[in-house]
Image: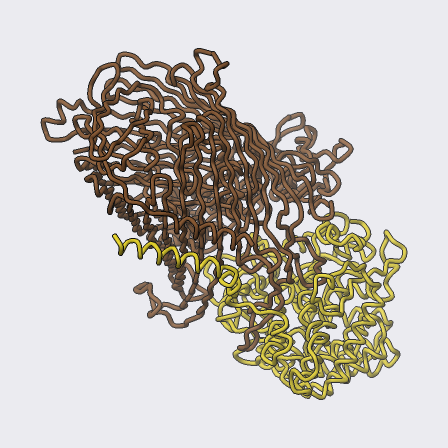
Chain colours: A yellow, B brown
Amino acid sequence: MNKLKILLLVIAGGLLFSTTACNDILENVEPATSVSGEVVLTSPEGVRALRSSMYAKMHESFAYRTEYFVAPSAFTDETRNRPGSTRYQNLGQAVGTSGTAHIATWGTHYNIIQDANLLIGAVEDGVLPAAELNRIRAEALAIRAFALHNLVKVYGYDPGNFGVGELEGNWDAGVVIRTEPVIDVLDADLRPRSSVNEVYAQILADLARARSLADNLGTNNSFITLAFIDGLTARGYLYAGEWANAAQFAQSAINNFGGTLQDTPGGVANMFDENIGNHPEALFKLIINPDTEGGGFNNDGPATYTSDGFLAQIPTQFLVDKYEEGDYRLGWYRDCREAQRVALNQPTGCADINDGGFSLVKFNGAKGQTVDDLPFMRLAEMYLILAEAQYKAGNQAAGIAALTALRDARNAGETPASFASVQAFEDFILDERMRELALEGHRFFDLKRLRRDIRNPDGSIKMFASSYRILPQIGVGLRNVNPQLVENPGY
Amino acid sequence: MYQKLLTILLMVFFSSQIALAQTGSIVGQVTDAETGETLPGASILLTQLDRGAATDFDGNYVIQNVPAGTYNLTASFVGYRTFRQTVQVNAGQTTTLNIVMQTGAIGLDEVIVSGYAVTTKRELTGSIASVRAADIQDVPLQNTEALLQGRAAGVNVTADSGNPGAGFRVNIRGNGSVNAATQPLYIVDGVQISFDGLSTQAASTSPLNALNPNDIESIEVLKDASSAAIYGAQAAAGVVIITTKRGQVGRTQITARAETGVRSLARNVDYITSEQYVDYLAEGAQYITGWDFDFARDNRKDFLLGFFGEDPFNPGQLANTDWQDFIYSDGVTQRYNISMSGGTQATTFFLSGGYEDTEGTAFNTDFTRLNLRSNIDHQISDRWRTSLNVNLARSTQFGVCQDGNFINCPISQAMFEAPMSFPYNEDGSYNPFTRFGLANNPAVQMNEVDRVGTVTQIISNMNLIYRANDWLTFNGLVGVDYRNTDDQQYRSAIAAPAQGGFAFYAARQVQNFNTNLVANLRQTFNGVHNVSGLVGTEYRRNYVETRLVQGNGFPGPFFTVLNATADPVTAAGTFSEWRLGSYFTNVKYNYDERYFLNVVARYDGHSRFGAETRWGFFPSFSGAWRISEENFFDVSFIDELKLRVGYGTTGNSAIGNFASRGLYSAAGSYQGSTGLRPTQLANVNLGWEEATEINVGLDYELLQGRIFGAIDVYRKDNNELLFGRPLPSDSGFGSITENIGSVRNQGIEFEISTVNVNTGGFMWSSRFNIAFMENEILSLPEGTDIRADNTFDALKIGKPIGLIQTPRWAGVNPADGRPMWYDADGNITFNPVQSRDAIEYKDGVANVFGGFGNTLSYKGVTLDTFFQFSFGQWAFAQTDFYFTRTPDFLMNMTTEVMDRWRQPGDITYYPRAMLAGTDYVETANYRTQLSTQSMNNASYIRLKNISLSYNLPTRWTQQVGLNNVRVYASAINLLTWTAWPYYDPEVAFNPTDIYNNQTAASYPTERQVNAGIEIRF
């Protein structure tokens, strides 16, 4: 009996002890894979990991891995859906008079800017060696500029085009500019859309500041390089119609890049294949590990959308017709069944979209598991910017020379020595941009910045340049949270 | 402060005098009042001591070693009214008390487990529903939650899925939370069950799969705050207390049971045939091209032949496959149980073992469970008792993916595959031209994919009870719920060509531990002042660890293990935990069993919350008045009338383990470096959701217990709701969790049980319960509606959670067959705009639900029918709507398209044939435009259970040495009455969606017909 009494006292005592120490017990519970912001922003490992996150957010997001490349083609006349496929069918069917389908991603860009802002503004000097920290800041500035440009080119009219819309006489709303880190909930204040010109000023200021820190940047094009900073600056000036500046920075990008244009049939045809050419012209590309980072690619990566998977967006005959015989770039077009990594033996319907039954294999899952690296900017684009900007700046010979350099490298046929009008030149350069940059994220934005109507492959009007549908809807979701966001006209 | 006070209080109890008393015994015999026959197996209980005995085969009982004193003795037996009397025990003497029992319902003497203590319905001041083993003995259910379906007023139980082993949504008195969990707390013999670490291979798995329903003695649902407040911060969504069977003193009884049955799909959807499909497409093509019909038909047929290929068994023709038949087929279920119970005065036991194997209707689905239970009670001395319950279970659930428009899930494939496609070629190889290619051919999913979750679980508790003296008892409990879930998924290279096949394993371990120490008091002063109560402390820790591995690339179809894969691609693991420390007390007082007062308080500290708000205090008060005990009350046909009033506060702590902290989490990687990124803004003020509830109830018992039941009216306000307050997405954060907003649930619950006829061996009894409830959002962050224009997830003040907003459908234009809608002004429009034209239409709240049943028995034959019903929920069947009504994607089409508009003047609900939803000029896409036409009423009445059993006459069975042999046949979900046009209204929701108004390819519940035999000896 006594033993039992002792047992009781021991149990009771133990319980009382454990519960009086309760508060301590309740405090010592820590998450497995999370830490506080303080730890991250003040430790070298933490800042490096934040930088990795910034790059990772790009390849993790549909907006960067697929929408960036494929949507501007599907939305215009470069690609159409193979019968029975549905990916981006809504963009192909979108017209200028009804609906809301558009290339419209908002939050993802700001998720990337969130990490960039922390790296730019929340890491004290001394946490890392100055050179490394400045390198990271330069990268973050460039990536913030890149994200802002990707936003503003969708949501607002390009500088100088504010009067193009039929509904509002002068519509210059851009996107929200947020350049300070959000550390406390009070930092997450509600902001209105800045004007397009303000956004471009911010982009160019970020790029200028990045350039001032560029001594610390490496030449590895899988991170931000000086050539990319120049290239993005050139792209920004091109969209803004500032031809002289665009030409200057395009030339600077070409010079800083170091590499040259591919000028052999194999060199051109295989440049997108990571196992062969491996992006020799990329000013900036993201490298994806198919085993650990390929999760989303299988379902909605660019290859899945185009040539290794759902075979949804197939190049139109209109696009294929743009090439002359012998153009090395025709190497990017392959029989859509053979191009699949797991070859198909069933009818595909690709020939309904182009006579040869081709798919465009820039993204073809060469790394396995439908994964490709993501080249966001190529040297060829710099030649095209240089050509267009020089010509429009009045240096027609220099413009045609840049165009010829590219076309000769591609064996594209003879380049006209002169053009009857700026319009004729612009028509030609638009075609050249299709030939070179199809499925690389340009077609819609080229037509938009040049106030061209969006047409179907058969030439019929899809949406007039003045249609409200050129700009996307901000949407009630965003506007419910932030009533200061004004909606684009027509929605 | 509270902690110190409670600690001192506990100390005082422990230091109280522990005196040894001398003992005596009670003996007697129990007989039936009408026939005089003895009653074996009746339970005798001394309520003060919580000790008792069962009568033996001759109706005799003995309770020894009873300390001298006066006790309340009760005797109870199924079908008889409880006998109550005080009895005097003198030291060294034997008191004889013979008991005569009257037939009738148990009514108010029913013993109720109400949280850390046992009480009777008579003493109850709160609202508790209970289900007994006797109510459900012939219900062939594998799942504990299902036992509650329709049987407890105000408890809305809906199946997540028809997948055998799937979980349930148990909603007690409405949805009171938007972002914290709304599942009740489950307690099995004092062990609080964890919801963590469930298998992910079948979309839904019940956390109670380890329990065998045959082992369950009773289930009590603590519905109102005054009952549930004793569980404090875990109780806002109610508490379900499950008590398993225990042994009774007497000869060992062995019960063996075997049953088998067939499961089939409860409802089918009718889809059109290939030829009807061609006609439809031809018509659709005609409108676009102007072709004549025959040409259009040939053209479309050729197109389909090219697209799908020729029927392998009928060259040149289209196949006509019934994919529902292919995917769903009848499953066989079998179930075996054996239990032994008995014991001596000192030790009683209940031992049981069970095995069941249930095949689902969708291919590959299956659930097996093997469980062993041992419940042992031992009286160590006259002051010490102990008990040990151990339940070991291993369950295996073969599942299919579901609840989404997935191209590889059979439930959606039944809608995605058109009749023109077919699973196999003539040579038996897989047809690669099914709708989503070879890898997603349903036959490939059937044969080349395995998804299985295996759970090994221990639920066990040990109690040590010390009776300090006749008014004070200490009860210590240690409970464990250890669950080990092993998920495996295998896909061959055919099903996963990109990876060359893969094997995926997930191991999830849950270590869920709780312990408590409770002091129980009970004392009567001056014969009329009855005081009882308890003081206790409790600690719970819930720890879950997960490890995931995946290997890709098999050399061939020979292996399925990781060792045979070429590339290890996933190695992931993490853990998470929470802890809860508590003090609680309950004081009960009654005057002469006429006026009752009950005070409960619990003080909880939770590791999930910020330092400022860690501890929460949850009090409740309730009282009851037994009007029928008053002298002035003189209504002869009313035996009992009790008014109950309760008010209390409970908490909801079911949020993320670290929701209050500012976090950077490991996520993403680039070039071999793992990323760290901000994922959550800090919020030190994050605190509990609180529910305050007022409940007024009336218990009644009429006509000598032939009619009894209760009426309850309640209003529950859930305040301080945890909301993710949306942040502007340009901040990079989606939202911050804050305590803002409140929701009200209020309603009326009514239950009645009657014994309609009880003469000459014929007995007919009925039971009925119904709950009316409404749900309303009272306040929201900053007073602004959230997602105010959205179709399904708008949160608007004054409206229920789950409001559906959609434009009105105006029918089909009789002139040209175009679909039409109404705009906001009531004019016809062909392009409705959600934000402008939507009306507040219906909601996903089931406002009226309940069940009713009848039991008829005569000379050993018993027929039991039980209906369950639910009204008021509306839902949108995504997959059916988007994919089976138009031929955009060449998928199955429902026979609704046969009612299409064909010529001017036709008045019908389906527009003219189309090739795609976008065919109509300047008209919204018919496939995707939602409207009131898209929403369906998910109300139903279901014959949930019908069973017929026959007890073989004892004169036969005893000749072969058996006490009792019973054979029975039963069915569940045999009949359903509903307006729901698709598979199943009961699963018309998504298990993870609180709005309860959408469903996407949910695995339909199944009909099951069983037959079994039970032998006792």
- Residue B970 at x, y = what percent? 31, 30
- Residue at image position (73%, 38%) is B837
In this figure, what is the number of numbered marks?
A: 0
- Residue B525 at x, y = what percent? 42, 32
In front of the other: B162 or B548: B548
Q: Residue furthest left?
A: B959
Residue A358 visible (yes or no): no
- Residue at image position (28%, 20%) is B101
Left or right: where does residue A225 sit relative to residue B663? Answer: right
Q: Residue A471 occupies which quadrant of the picture? A: bottom right
Image height check: is B940 above or below A154?
above
In front of the other: B720 or A161: B720
- Residue B756 at x, y = what percent? 37, 15
Left or right: where does residue B759 sit relative to residue B548? Answer: left
Residue B430 visible (yes or no): yes
Image height check: is A91 above or below A405?
above
In front of the other: B300 or A98: A98
